[in-house]
Amino acid sequence: MQQQFPPLQAPRRLLFGPGPSMVAPRVYAAMSQNVVGHLDPFFFEVAEEIRLLIAYAYSTVNEFNLAISGTGSSGMEAAVANFVEPGQKFALLTNGFFAERIGEMARRHGADIVRFAKDWGQPFDPQEARDFIRRERPRVVAFVQAETSTGMFNQSRTICEAAHEVDALVIADCVTSLGGMPVLVDENGIDIAYGCTQKGLGCPPGLAPMTVSPRALDWLEKRTTPVTSWYLDLRLLDTFYSGHKYHHTASATLFYALREALVMVSEEGLEHRCERHRRNHVAFVAGIEAMGLQMLVDGHHRLWTLNTPRVPDGVEDGKVRQYLLEERGIEIAGGFGPLAGKVFRIGLMGHGSTADNVLLVLEALEAALKQQGYRPAGDSRAAAEKALSAAV
Amino acid sequence: MQQQFPPLQAPRRLLFGPGPSMVAPRVYAAMSQNVVGHLDPFFFEVAEEIRLLIAYAYSTVNEFNLAISGTGSSGMEAAVANFVEPGQKFALLTNGFFAERIGEMARRHGADIVRFAKDWGQPFDPQEARDFIRRERPRVVAFVQAETSTGMFNQSRTICEAAHEVDALVIADCVTSLGGMPVLVDENGIDIAYGCTQKGLGCPPGLAPMTVSPRALDWLEKRTTPVTSWYLDLRLLDTFYSGHKYHHTASATLFYALREALVMVSEEGLEHRCERHRRNHVAFVAGIEAMGLQMLVDGHHRLWTLNTPRVPDGVEDGKVRQYLLEERGIEIAGGFGPLAGKVFRIGLMGHGSTADNVLLVLEALEAALKQQGYRPAGDSRAAAEKALSAAV
């Protein structure tokens, strides 16, 4: 080949977007351990540890927990492909981009979709959601617990209760809550939950941790049509992870990384970890508001992992992001769809959710805004520090 | 969490099964570089380099080349999901396990399947294959170029010519040929080829490099039904890799590893690399035959990447594999399906295809066979060394 390829030199980014988040050195170290085969006894030991650790991270006693060999979106497709049968009624509760993505997948898999929609970033009214589910009596209800497009946390309990009343299964997207907020699969009554590795868990992307309730497994056994996706067929995957029979070549490398990240969750303790995320989120918001910016989402509906301050008038969000990336090596994200140009999406999650990073991002964001002529209302650092010390 | 998890300590396996193969230190090093976001300009630089390097490894001028975010089997499903429409005629040429897997996927995606089948490990007669395709006039023809279940190389040319005569697309599974044997996509006329990272390329598993011809892209544009899989929809993936518009969170980590492995292919030169595999394969077979074992597949149909000697009478293949794994840290594989207990599957591929490894595996295999009471016919080391020096 004529073209020359210089040695790879990845820049050191400070990852404060909606994911991937910062990766702890010990996760990188685990990942560079020797590859073993996907049928090696050691591989299955690691897979079994991951099974237990996924249960812990989701707060569930479910035994069917595994990591899908793909990104979070493959977890979403696994949920839809296995639990949607063509022509069956599928209730979508949507108030953001990722719920719409679930709907698009369900459409492709032949679902009869009924929608309960709010504007992006607006909460569901619990009574309305309940009435909708009771009225529609779907086979499956799907919603996004942590909506990455808006920074909104959707409460699960009422949705799950109403779904179970009409004997429907509940699919919850936990991509941006897993490892950073209380997902509480069992307490909420979620039947199928999926997440990703590169946000609250602080791992590189590549796997989708998933948990499935016994109730959903019963449903799956009674399914009459084949699952269209062979790659994501949960019953086939179970012959591999439980039966140790070849299905696909799961990546030992990614499993090492995920195990290490999940062990870090268990060592910190899930409650402490969520509390760390909450505390840093609160301090960050205190700083943002002191600066004079407003948050898109109302107080108690906010994610602790991903913050969505509105872009102030007269500021171009693209220029702010460009300044941060080029001058500070910081990645944050903008909004898209109806929120394009209107919000920043700033993640403080996993290994990256620290008090130091709260102050670092506030300072850098303020500098970027000043470049655009914005004049901060007050002292964001002082406000954040005050919140941090009050929280201790 | 009550359970304690000790530090991860992966054993050092010598990977001489059908994959994963040994990973070069520089690939591990690339993989532990800093994660960047999937929309980072640097990520797209790496993805663009990978696009060019995939074309080189497949010997194609195709511009549509990408790495699917899943293992080789996800590449297979991407090929089937995008190029099979429900009810259309799909011709499967099968003489092994992985061709049957393509058939299973095509069935799930609604194809009208017609089969041209040979026993596992038996070649297709070119004239028969041609007649079959001319008679059936399918929309798509699928076959496995390098059949990992049998160690057989299926010649592509006649199949592709006959398919194009009847205006069918050709899908070829190159999972065990890519990076170790001449795939020759353009010269053969393959329309859709997919492979994996963990065999001839010597990379950890997790991605499926794929190339698609302009002819197949035209076909895709005219497709009338939606692709059921959102995750594997090639047109959506193109909006990400070409259009830099978010689709899924591709793993920078895996992309770094794949780039490094592909750069190693380009530095060695594809022809030299394939010749290295051929030379070491020939020497290994010389040693195997000197030992008194027979190869399953006839001479010029053999893979250079994966060898399938028959298990000699009176030997239990499971005990041989157990001895190798436990006493030598060597992974090889057994046969399955109709070949269960009848063959060993021994890979010398990617970074692991070296003269030293030929001798190492022969010696270890001989020791394992002796444990089972087998008496070697002759001097396998001498035969292999002779072949190696003759080949220089």
Image (spheres, coloured by chain):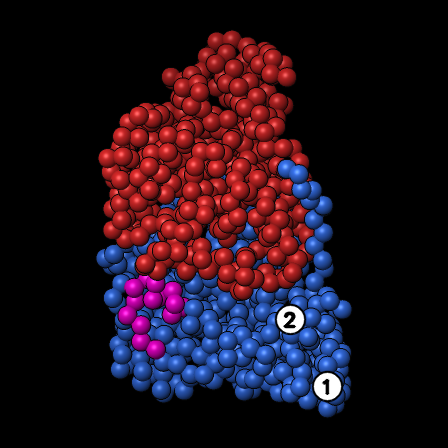
Chain colours: A red, B blue
Instruction: Find numbered disc 2 in the image and state the secondary structure of the residue it sits on.
Output: loop
Q: Quadrant of residue B103?
A: bottom left
Tell whether position B109 is magenta: yes
Residue that protrudes farthest toward the bottom in the picture: B377
Closer to the camera, A276 or B269?
Answer: A276
Relative to B303, is B84 on the left or the right?
left
Q: Residue at x 56, y 12 (%)?
A: A383
Q: Position of residue A186 (x, y in %)?
A: 48, 37
Relative to B285, is B249 on the left or the right?
left
Q: Is residue B92 visible?
A: yes
Q: Residues within 10 Å of mark 2 (few under 14, many from 20)?
A: many
Q: Is residue B53 visible?
A: no
Whole-Å distance between the Cαs marked 1 and 2?
A: 18 Å
Tell whether position A389 is magenta: no
Q: What is the three-letter code of the residue carrying label 1?
A: Tyr
Q: What is the three-letter code of the residue carrying label 2?
A: Ile
Relative to B77, is A291 on the left or the right?
right
The residue carrying mark 1 is B374
Instruction: Find numbered disc 1 in the image and state the secondary structure of the residue it sits on.
Output: loop
Give residue B332's mark: 2
Could you tell me which quadrant the N terminus of chain A lies in? bottom right
Q: Position of residue B273 (x, y in %)?
A: 60, 70
Give residue A9's mark: none
Closer to the camera, B290 or A333?
Answer: B290
Q: Which residues are magenta?
A: B102-115
Q: Position of residue A79 (x, y in %)?
A: 40, 47
Q: Is residue A233 above or below residue B252?
A: below
Q: Quadrant of residue B268?
A: bottom right
Q: Residue at x 54, y 74 (%)?
A: B336
